[in-house]
Image (cartoon, helix red, strand yellow):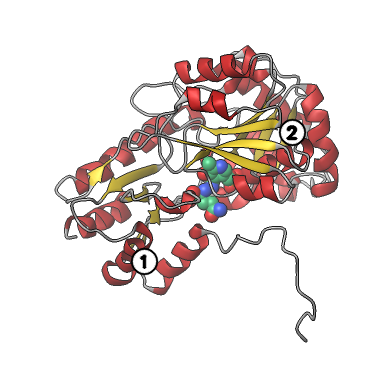
Amino acid sequence: MPTYPRPIASKLPNVGTTIFTVMSRLAQEHNAINLSQGFPDFDCAKALRDLVTKYINSGVNQYPPMAGIPRLRERIAEKVESLYGAKYDSENEVTVTPGATYAIFTAVTALVQPGDEVILFEPAYDSYAPSVEVNGGVPVYVQLRYPDYSIDWQQVGRAITPKTRMIIINTPNNPTASVFSGEDMRMLESILRGTDVVVVSDEVYEHIVFDGHRHQSVARFPGLAERSFVVSSFGKTYHVTGWKMGHVLAPKELMAEFRKVHQFNVFVANGPLQYALAEFMENRDAYLSLATFYQRKRDFFLEGVKASRFKPLPSRGTFFQNLAYDAISDERDTDLAIRLTKERRIASIPVSVFYREPPDHKVLRFCFAKSEETLAKGAEILCKI
Ligand code: PMP
Ligand code: GLN
């Protein structure tokens, strides 16, 4: 192939390969325990795999309806109503998507015009800023307060200008493992009252909230629900991150704009998987038991690293545990994460990569969506560092 002969005016000049790809690749190269990229090292339920086979063999292999099959949209609307008390019309207000990343990107693309400001919290999940920038939007950052990653709502209030089109929130939060309280949601609701700011609420870890707390979905708060896209992911809920299946809910006016983009971006999400998921969703226990399932893993990992020199930060939700290493090294977290992968064979994610200007916080993120065997091996290594 000859080289492309002209300079390219990149729409994302500062974007490289994601940290998840970088660290997972490095882990593989060095045969390290991979607690970096967030995905389970165990399989999904056999019943779910059997359903996929059943539906593929039953011949539902052509394009489903653009917004998703009605049966699945109905199950999603029912679930959201029973958990969060919000009624969404499955015909006009629920769309099945190829993953949550896609849903967030499409919501931003549908609503954000060049020059519009979008408020993001830092540290920010890595897909948010590129989604905004590729659409000509301008990210405006509000810092979460280290080390508890709480929100300064006055600062959020000050960040809102006449150009603010959107705010992207994420609870339970990746990478901080913090969760919004009901009070956080009420603050957001009151700050946005009277504005036309749209909320994109990334709730992919909605079923993974620990210690008896409940997930604060924007759907619970009418003043937020009326202006929000609520995004979730089957990948996290059913241990199938590779399926890239998710969903989004929004009032019909917002959803109509979403679908204008969606129908030309992908048209529709994978069909047979939708049939399988719709049937599997009838078993409510599969998602209602997820918090207990992951809390046990969190506690197993915490017990394992108790004797180490790492200091755990609170993990209130998600499947991530952050460990501070102030007592161990002065190195930057990016250097340490690479060195530990190569020399100690344990891979993690340096949290500073989720900031534009890396702060001097000494924190590594570890994924505990792993078998106890993997977690025990990982913890044993960490105890020797
Ligand atoms: N948002 C957050 C906060 C995530 O952690 C993830 C998972 N990697 C996603 C979105 C993406 O989910 P999906 O794989 O369904 O696109
Ligand atoms: N969300 C996952 C994580 O935080 C990774 C997803 C991805 O690789 N893009 O680790």
* Apparent side of residue 207 relative to residue 145 in the rendered image (left or right): right
Task: Examine the rendering and report whether any part of residue 68 can be seen.
Answer: no
Q: Is residue 82 above or below residue 32?
A: above
Ligand 1 is located in which of the four quadrants? top right
Q: Earlier in the sequence, mark 1 or mark 2?
A: 2
Q: Is residue 199 above or below residue 124?
A: above
Expressed as whole percent of the image width and height from the top left, the position of residue 92 reads 80, 24
Label 2 Cα crowd, 10 Å radius (few <14 / some 14-19 / many 20+): many
- Quadrant location, the C terminus: bottom left
Secondary structure type for disc 2:
strand
- Residue that badge 1 annotates: 338
Q: Which of the 4 image quadrants contains residue 167?
A: top right
Q: Which of the 4 image quadrants contains residue 193?
A: top right
- Residue that badge 2 annotates: 95
* Apparent side of residue 378 relative to residue 156 in the rendered image (left or right): left
The one of 149 and 371 positioned closer to us in this rendering? 149
Label 1 Cα crowd, 10 Å radius (few <14 / some 14-19 / many 20+): many
Q: Alpha carbon of mark 1 to alpha carbon of mark 2: how far?
A: 39 Å
The one of 274 and 379 positioned closer to us in this rendering? 379
Q: Which residue appears at 61% of the width and 47% of the height?
A: 129
Secondary structure type for disc 1:
helix
Check disc 1 and give the amino acid type: Ile
